[in-house]
């Protein structure tokens, strides 16, 4: 489905902002112009929902979750950063493995099955993109992904 990714993201973040129970700031760094991608909207909603709910689970009171979208050549680059506990360097690539969870005790307390990011990776790769994590222990985590821009159409600028 041809989709303006900027409007799509705004809609998802609006929903989180309205339903939030924690004191969290939702920061958006989005281009003003639409950026079109060809995505399965239901699946992409699932991907972003999981990244946001992870960020919220591991965020401190008053922390910010920042969404940044930029254009990089033929790709769209999305970065969702939090100011939470972070992920140790040696575990960064493992969080995309099914059922993998960084700290068993902490994760059990916070709930979840360890499937969210594995599913996100499958979905992003199925749509022709890549996904990875960057993090500094105790400073925060960023989940980044790319998606190919929709080639068809007259949206060039
Ligand atoms: P599920 O998504 O299935 O409910 P989950 O959130 O534990 O369970 P994933 O979303 O796949 O599973 O995340 C895997 C693990 O990566 C988490 O258990 C957590 O240890 C770590 N992780 C993910 N996102 C963050 C984050 N923003 N900050 C710190 N750790 C994270
Ligand atoms: Mg999750």
Image (cartoon, grey):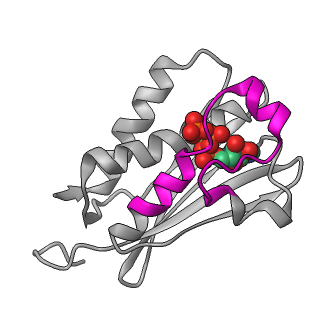
Q: Nearest the camera: 44 or 16?
A: 44
Depth order, front residue of 5/87: 87
Taking the magenta stretch, the answer to whether it contains residue 99 is: yes
Residue 68 percent coordinates (x, y): 53, 56
Rendered image quadrant of residue 27 = top right
**What span is in magenta?**
95-123
Query: In the displayed structure, would residue 55 be above or below residue 79?
Result: above
In terms of image quadrants, where is residue 38?
Answer: bottom left
Residue 117 magenta:
yes
Picture residue at 48% right of the left edge, 18% below the top: 19
Compared to residue 3, the image places residue 116 above or below, namely above
Q: Quarter-wise, where is residue 30 in the image? A: bottom left
Left or right of 108: which side holds 70? Answer: left
Q: Position of residue 133 (x, y in %)?
A: 66, 62
x and y percentages locating residue 3 in the rendered image: 21, 56
- Residue 94 vertical position relative to residue 101 in the rendered view, above or below: below
Q: Quadrant where the C terminus lies?
A: bottom left
Asked if residue 77 can be seen in this view, the reply is yes
Residue 55 lies, with reference to residue 98, above or below; the image says above
Q: Residue at x 16, y 58 (%)?
A: 1
Q: Residue furthest right?
A: 138
Q: Residue at x 81, y 38 (%)?
A: 104
Residue 27 seen anywhere in this rendered image of the structure: no
The residue drawn where x is 55% and y is 45% is 115
Name, please, the residue furthest toward the bottom.
73
């Amino acid at each position: 489905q041809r989709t303006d990714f900027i409007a799509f993201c705004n809609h998802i973040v609006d929903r989180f902002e309205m339903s939030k129970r924690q004191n969290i700031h939702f920061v958006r760094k989005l281009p003003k112009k639409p950026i079109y991608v060809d995505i399965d909207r239901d699946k992409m909603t699932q991907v972003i929902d999981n990244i946001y709910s992870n960020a919220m689970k591991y965020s401190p009171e008053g922390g910010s979750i920042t969404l940044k979208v930029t254009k990089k050549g033929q790709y769209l680059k999305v970065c969702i950063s939090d100011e939470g506990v972070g992920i140790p360097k040696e575990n960064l690539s493992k969080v995309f493995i099914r059922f993998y969870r960084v700290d068993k005790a902490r994760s059990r307390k916070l709930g979840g099955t360890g499937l969210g990011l594995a599913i996100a990776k499958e979905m992003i790769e199925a749509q022709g993109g890549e996904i990875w994590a960057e993090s500094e222990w105790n400073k925060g985590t960023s989940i980044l992904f790319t998606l190919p821009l929709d080639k068809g159409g007259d949206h060039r600028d």
